[in-house]
Image (spheres, rainbow, N blue to C red):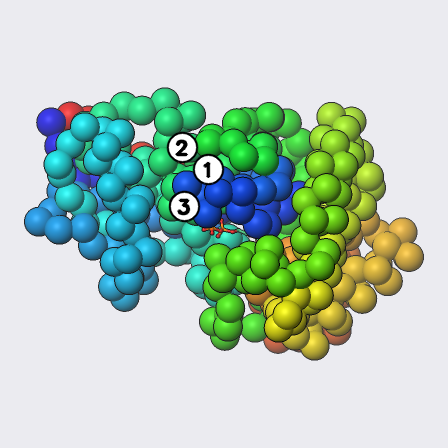
């Protein structure tokens, strides 16, 4: 039986970055990524059977081309001819750099399956979500997740209860939409950055380092690997022709402030995705000091504090 459903999914922040595709048509990642699903921020999506596929995000109809392959894959997997209308909104500013495509496609995959009355397991949902956005493969699980290079699905390493003291502070330094979509920027890095091969080779080592640190709950070592992952990803981007630079002056100020916090013995390790925002990894006891020092530097800065969060949740419907 089919029906309308509502699903909430939280974004997956990459501690170790996915950047680059092994197979563009199938959307398979070229690097392994280590994700952390964030609590307290989410995409909420209402999905219902419809005459044609449509996605409306924060009141705006989205480009159908972007979703065509995803919906076709959903229909193939669910063995249905059903079409879907999805209305989605983010609880956080879409420009907040909180990987809204990860929560968006995770919510959509779960929503379509439930709206069609199919109970897929998390692995199958991860495969579908990945077709939309590879980072979304991770967001169908809570806690700490791994999407291996070339993998069709992510898996959960630890639930959200594994490290309850861990915090992520998302510093929104600009609300302007990003100029370069990550998909396009990944293509440029692959085809026009002399550092791309080094980035791929290195990402395996960084993952191993981060996994070891995660097993020991060693924030300093994890933070170190997290910093290397984003800085090397952005170095490859910056070295491409034409160069791609997502950072603003305020981005650099936050990076520097984190360095100064660490020098003062306060653990704050930043990471940056395909945009100007900075996400800072720290422990619960250090979060107030990190927040205070950033607010002193930039009084208008808006910050969202997140802890490790759960996977997608069905809010309404889907019982058929
Ligand atoms: C920098 O998952 O949005 O956030 O698969 O092309 O849709 P597509 O890319 P997407 O890229 C995310 C890139 C990143 C790093 C990450 O989340 O791993």
| 280 relative to 295, above or below | above
**Mark 3 — residue?**
25
- For the residue with label 2, is its CB less than 8 Å from the closest atom of ligand 1? no
Instruction: Give the mark nearer the N terminus: 1 vs 3.
Output: 3
> Who's the residue at 32% across and 56% down the image?
66
Residue 54: x and y, percent? 20, 54
Q: Mark 1 Cα within 10 Å, few/some/many (few <14, many 20+)?
A: many
Residues at discs 1 and 3 in contact (Cβ within 8 Å): no
Q: How many marks?
A: 3
| 320 relative to 32, above or below | above
**Mark 1 — residue?**
137
* Mark 1–mark 3 distance (CA, rounded to whole Å): 16 Å
Instruction: Give the mark nearer the N terminus: 2 vs 1.
Output: 2
Residue 119 found in image quarter:
top left
Q: Which element carries disc 3, helix, strand or loop?
A: loop
Q: Is residue 73 left or right of residue 83?
A: right
**Mark 2 — residue?**
127
Residue 128 shows in the view: yes
> Who's the residue at 67% across and 31% down the image?
163
Q: Is residue 266 left or right of residue 93?
A: right
Residue 176: x and y, percent? 50, 74
Tag on residue 119? none
- Closest to the camera, between mark 1 and mark 3, is 3
Residues at discs 2 and 1 in contact (Cβ within 8 Å): yes
Instruction: Give the mark nearer the N terminus: 3 vs 2.
Output: 3
Closer-to-camera residue (219/72): 72
Closer-to-camera residue (78/92): 78
């Amino acid at each position: 039986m089919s029906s309308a459903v509502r699903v909430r999914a939280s974004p997956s922040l990459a501690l170790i970055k996915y950047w680059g595709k092994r197979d563009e048509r199938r959307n398979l990642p070229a690097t392994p990524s280590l994700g952390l699903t964030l609590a307290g921020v989410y995409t909420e999506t209402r999905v219902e059977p419809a005459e044609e596929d449509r996605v409306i995000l924060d009141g705006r109809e989205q480009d159908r081309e972007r979703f065509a392959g995803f919906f076709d894959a959903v229909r193939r997997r669910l063995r249905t001819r059903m079409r879907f209308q999805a209305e989605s909104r983010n609880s956080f500013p879409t420009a907040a750099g909180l990987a809204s495509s990860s929560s968006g496609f995770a919510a959509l995959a779960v929503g379509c399956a439930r709206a069609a009355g199919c109970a897929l397991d998390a692995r199958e949902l991860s495969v579908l979500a990945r077709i939309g956005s590879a980072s979304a493969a991770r967001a169908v699980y809570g806690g700490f997740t791994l999407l291996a290079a070339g993998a069709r699905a992510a898996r959960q390493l630890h639930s959200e209860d594994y490290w309850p003291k861990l915090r992520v502070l998302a510093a929104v330094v600009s609300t302007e939409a990003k100029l370069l979509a990550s998909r396009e920027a990944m293509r440029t890095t692959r085809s026009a950055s002399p550092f791309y091969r080094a980035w791929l080779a290195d990402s395996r080592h960084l993952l191993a380092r981060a996994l070891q640190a995660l097993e020991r709950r060693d924030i300093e070592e994890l933070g170190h690997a997290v910093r290397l992952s984003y800085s090397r990803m952005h170095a490859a981007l910056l070295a491409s022709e034409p160069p791609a630079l997502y950072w603003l002056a305020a981005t650099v100020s936050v990076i520097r402030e984190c360095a100064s916090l660490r020098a003062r013995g306060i653990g704050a390790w930043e990471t940056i995705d395909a945009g100007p925002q900075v996400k800072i990894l720290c422990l619960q006891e250090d979060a107030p000091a990190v927040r205070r020092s950033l607010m002193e530097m930039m009084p208008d800065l808006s910050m969202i504090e997140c802890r490790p969060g759960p996977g997608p949740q069905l809010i309404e419907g889907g019982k058929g």
